Structures are given as structure tokens and as C-alpha cells.
């Protein structure tokens, strides 16, 4: 089974792009499923269900969303194998910009939109920097000059990535993206694989539910600003 991690900032158009790409995959008679990871709430699973796409939804709630992803992705992969999927897509929002769901040897896609601001690419971190493909959306509502400047900023952050423009409404560019992803490697399991980027250090009193402010309540990994 092919496994793809697709991530990007909220409202960048990930789900719209994935739906169009799945349409293209279906033209090749491929059976595709989706695992949607989010933090508090999402209705994106209903959009997949409307198109008879097998989908699982996972909400991290009060847990670190990226830790939640890592804790569940292997079981989700097994679910896809049991369904006999040809391709399983993992969709997540890359919620803290310091982590990424991208896994070594697994094709990684970052979706980012032209409206997010020209300085956004350098703020996103490993979710963009370690992606194999960067999909830029919403190009139809900015000028050609703005599209070129934004793409150059993306290229500066991740010079090795393939950059594709996809319109999540019309589907323009989705077939080209699906053709690139079609050549992704097959995987029997995720067991033993590693993340492309380590998570920031955590494990502090606030991770464990502390709400009081003060040095006496700060335990675990604590770092102070330089005075």
C-alpha cells in the first residue's frame, strides 16, 4: 500500500486538494482512503464520506496533536491494509509549526496557500522544509507577480521540493499531482520507520495539566529568556 502524509496550515485547502487528487486516482481505478487528524473539531470526514471514500477521524483533544499522530498512525496504516486500499492518505494540520508528520521513506506533501503572506514559508518549519512536494493553492485570486514571489519564497525554504500549483475548486493541477504521487513507494508496514524531524522537547508541568503561574510550579523542561 502507498502511504502519503499531507499536511499544511489550517484553511490552506488540504481537503479540497485531496478530494481532487482522489478523483484523479479513481480514474486509475485505485482504492483510496483517508485518515484525518485534527485537534479539537473537524467535519472534513463528512466530505470524504459523501464521496464514498473510506475515512477515519482522530481528534487529539487535550493531548499534543503531533504526539497523538505518532501514537496512532501505525494502527491507521493497519486499518488501510485491512481494507485493501491501494493508497492511504494521512491529512493533518501541522498544528504547532514545530513538528511535522512526515516520515522517512514515505512521500510527504505540504499544502500552503498564496494568501497566507510572503513571510509564511519561513515560519512553517519542518512541515514545509522536509516535504517532497509543496502544493500551492489559491493562485487564482492573486496576481502573477504575487504567485511568483510566493513560489520563490517556498523554493528558498525547501529548494529540493517539487512545487506544484493546484486549484482545489476547479481541480486544475490535481492530475499532475496525482501522477507524481502515483510513483510513491509501496509499504508493508510503518514499524521501524522514523520521523523526518524530531519533536521539540516537552514534558513539563503544563503538559501534565498545571495551570498555576510561577517558578515553583514549573518542572521538567524549562528554559528562561536571556536577561
Image (tube, rainbow, N blue to C red):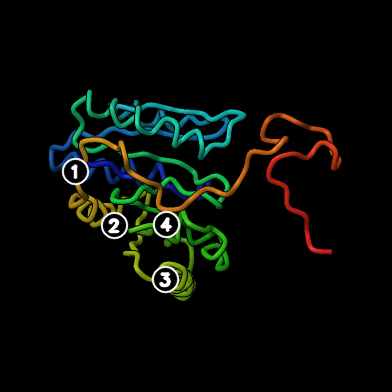
Work out whether mark 3 precedes mark 2 in sequence or the reverse, and give the earlier one. 3
Front tag of 4 and 3 = 3
Q: Position of residue 109 (x, y in %)?
A: 36, 52
Reading the image, the residue beneath label 2 is: 173
Q: Is residue 179 left or right of residue 141?
A: left
Q: Residues under labels 2 and 1: Cα distance? A: 24 Å
Q: Are marks 2 and 1 in contact (CB under 8 Å)?
A: no
CA neighbours of label 1 inside 10 A, class few (<14), some (14 to 19), many (20+): few
**Residue that carries the numbered disc 1 in the rendered image:** 186
Which marked residue is nearer to the observer: mark 3 or mark 2?
A: 3
Quadrant in the picture for residue 35: top left
Residue 155, label in figure: 3
Mark 4 → mark 2, Cα distance in angstroms: 10 Å
Residue, disc 4: 137
- Identify the residue shown where x is 34% and y is 58%: 133
Mark before the other along the chain sequence, 2 or 1? 2
The location of residue 123, given as percent across then percent down, is 57, 61
SS for callout 2:
loop
For the residues bearing labels 1 and 4, Cβ distance under 8 angstroms: no
Amino acid at each position: 500500500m502507498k502511504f502519503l502524509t499531507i499536511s499544511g496550515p489550517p484553511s490552506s485547502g488540504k481537503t479540497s486538494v485531496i478530494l481532487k487528487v482522489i478523483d484523479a486516482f479513481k480514474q486509475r481505478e485505485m482504492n483510496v482512503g483517508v485518515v484525518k487528524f485534527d485537534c479539537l473539531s473537524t467535519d472534513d470526514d463528512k466530505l470524504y464520506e459523501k464521496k464514498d471514500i473510506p475515512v477515519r477521524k482522530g481528534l487529539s483533544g487535550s493531548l499534543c496533536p503531533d504526539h497523538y499522530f505518532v501514537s496512532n498512525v501505525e494502527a491507521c496504516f493497519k486499518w488501510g491494509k485491512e481494507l485493501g486500499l491501494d493508497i492511504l492518505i494521512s491529512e493533518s494540520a501541522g498544528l504547532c509549526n514545530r513538528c511535522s508528520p512526515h516520515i522517512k521513506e514515505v512521500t510527504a506533501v505540504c499544502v500552503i496557500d498564496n494568501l497566507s503572506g510572503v513571510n509564511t514559508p519561513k515560519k512553517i518549519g519542518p512541515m514545509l522544509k522536509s516535504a517532497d512536494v509543496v502544493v500551492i493553492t489559491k493562485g487564482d485570486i492573486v496576481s502573477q507577480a504575487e504567485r511568483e514571489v510566493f513560489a520563490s519564497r517556498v523554493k528558498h525554504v525547501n529548494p529540493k521540493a517539487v512545487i506544484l500549483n493546484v486549484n482545489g475548486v476547479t481541480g486544475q493541477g490535481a492530475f499532475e499531482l496525482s501522477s507524481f504521487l502515483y510513483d510513491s513507494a509501496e509499504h508493508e508496514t510503518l514499524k521501524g520507520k522514523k520521523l523526518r524531524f524530531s519533536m521539540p522537547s516537552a514534558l513539563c508541568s503544563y503538559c501534565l495539566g498545571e495551570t498555576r503561574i510561577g517558578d515553583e510550579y514549573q518542572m521538567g523542561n524549562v528554559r528562561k529568556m536571556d536577561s
